[in-house]
Image: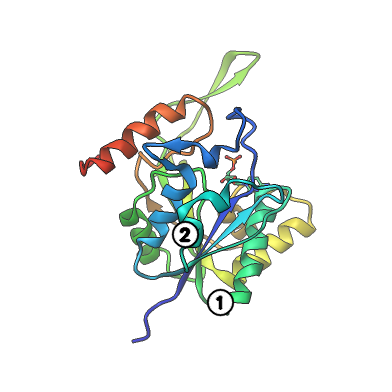
Amino acid sequence: MRARRVWAVVPAAGRGERFGGGRPKQYETLAGRAVIEWSVSALLACRDVVGVMVALAGDDRDWSTLAIASDHRVHTCRGGKHRSDSVLAGLEALHELNADDTDPVLVHDAARPAVTAAAIEALIRGADGPSGGLLALPVADTLKRGEAGESVATAERSGLWAAQTPQMFPLGTLREALREGRAQGVAVTDEAQAMERRGYRPRLVAGEAGNIKLTRRGDRVLLEAILHSRTRGQTE
Ligand code: C5P
């Protein structure tokens, strides 16, 4: 049996405005490595992953300083205005590496450094169909609708999942879904949304609670603790 070829696209062209600070959050150092190095390394640790396409901002000055930039499986392209534009640019650039439309592609945010290779491999196994799939967790907290800082309603949480990345889909199907979203002026916030709009039902694969996105300054402390525990060889 031919070894499966799985590709990855890492959108890393954002400025991280909610995070603040001088440099984009994907270049913050956590537990001794840049956030994006943790993210890309987890993808490279998966046996089936043959290439990673990182979408960078046009004025990026940090990427080329990282050791991972010289890994022969890692490539770069120019990202776009919105996250979905960066993902689409990455998918289009994969064709230059002879990726096939039927090959599965993992899309993973640069800003989620604590994903584990085990979780990615569970997704690769669990989302290997025409609808693809995503890592996600059932919502545990009670959800409130807020208005002017006051709680006005309690949302029904049964059946609700919090979406993470990576998300994995067949390359050609995802590209067409994202192109359609763009043509219709819909701001899709993740790949699964673009697929759902076309009638696909991506599989929900249980993720890990530690796979949080570096969004606000406070996330740093938690992520750093998780990543430090890994470097000490401890389990979460
Ligand atoms: O800002 P947010 O946390 O939603 O960004 C998620 C990921 O998308 C980050 O890794 C960020 O760098 C990336 N992104 C991008 N191009 C944009 C905006 C965000 O690649 N135009």
Taking the image as drawn, is residue 218 in sight?
yes
**Residue placed farthest to the left in the image?**
234
Q: Residue at x 38, y 54 (%)?
A: 42
Element carrying mark 1: loop
Q: Quadrant of the C terminus?
A: top left
Give the residue pinned by disc 1: 99
How far across and how far down the image is residue 22, in percent? 62, 30
Q: How is the image coloured?
A: rainbow
Closer to us: 236 or 183:
236
Q: Residue at x 34, y 59 (%)?
A: 122
Q: Is residue 156 left or right of residue 31?
A: right
The residues tagged by marks 2 and 1 sit, at their Cα atoms, a distance apart of 19 Å
Classify the position of ligand 1 by quadrant: top left, top right, bottom left or bottom right: top right
Closer to us: 124 or 43:
43
Q: Residue at x 21, y 44 (%)?
A: 233
How far across and how far down the image is residue 136, in percent? 43, 47
Q: Amino acid at mark 2?
A: Gly
Q: Is residue 82 left or right of residue 173?
A: right
Closer to us: 120 or 151:
120
Q: Is residue 152 above or below residue 32?
A: above
Q: Amino acid at mark 1?
A: Ala
Q: Is residue 154 left or right of residue 230?
A: right
Q: Is residue 62 left or right of residue 160?
A: right
Element carrying mark 2: strand
Number of numbered discs? 2
Closer to us: 177 or 153:
177
How far across and how far down the image is residue 4, in percent? 40, 77
Locate residue 23: give its quadrant: top right
In the image, which disc is placed on residue 133?
A: 2
Locate residue 127: give its quadrant: bottom left
